[in-house]
Image (tube, grey):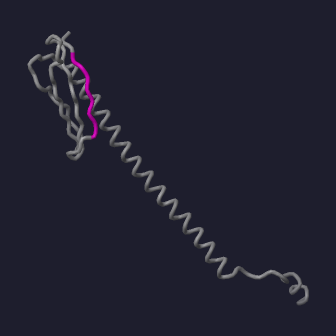
Amino acid sequence: MKRKMNLRFRGQRGIGLVETLVAVAVLGTAVVAFTVALSAGSLAVGEHDDSAIAQGLAQSQLEYTKSYAYNPGTATYPLLTAPAGYSLSVIVSAVPNTDNDIQKIIVTVNRDDEEIMRVQDYKVNR
């Protein structure tokens, strides 16, 4: 019986220390790479969210300003309420070489005092 056991395990040795260390190093590298990719993805999602919020705010402010009663002598129009951390500004100017029935509107969206987005459009007295 003992002879049969010896024949079965002949030529088979256990995993050595070097093989174990290589396997742990490969596994560790994979975990680090996965963690870095996950954090980079999280940052990208955060930036996209900021951009989407800024774009929505700018478009909403433009539409609100365009729907507001036309005032030929104004330099700005009322602002919408912005979420915490964001601020809006509207600058209105006359368009050169045209009549007084058209204005250029520039809406700027800031987050934490840093300009994120600036859009412009025209308002016509109808």
- Foreground pick, 72 / 4: 72
Say above or below: 95 vs 21. above
Residue 38, position in %: x, y? Answer: 47, 55
Question: For the view shown, which residue lies furthest in the front direction?
Answer: 97
Q: Quadrant of residue 78?
A: top left
- Foreground pick, 103 / 51: 103
Question: For the view shown, which residue lies furthest in the left direction?
Answer: 73
Say above or below: 82 vs 66. below
Say above or below: 114 vs 18. above
- Would residue 48 appear left or right of 86 to someone viewing this image? right
Based on the picture, tell me whether residue 45 belongs to the magenta stretch.
Answer: no
Q: Residue at x 60, y 68 (%)?
A: 26
Q: Specify the quadrant that holds the C terminus.
A: top left
Q: Specify the quadrant that holds the N terminus.
A: bottom right
Q: Residue at x 16, y 28 (%)?
A: 91
Based on the picture, tell me whether residue 121 belongs to the magenta stretch.
Answer: yes
Residue 65, position in %: x, y? Answer: 20, 23
Numbered range of the magenta stretch: 116-123
Residue 74, position in %: x, y? Answer: 10, 22
- Foreground pick, 118 / 12: 118
Total numbered labels: 0
Q: Residue at x 22, y 37 (%)?
A: 82
Say above or below: 40 vs 120. below
Q: Residue at x 83, y 82 (%)?
A: 11
Main SS of residues in magenta: strand
Q: Quadrant of residue 93?
A: top left
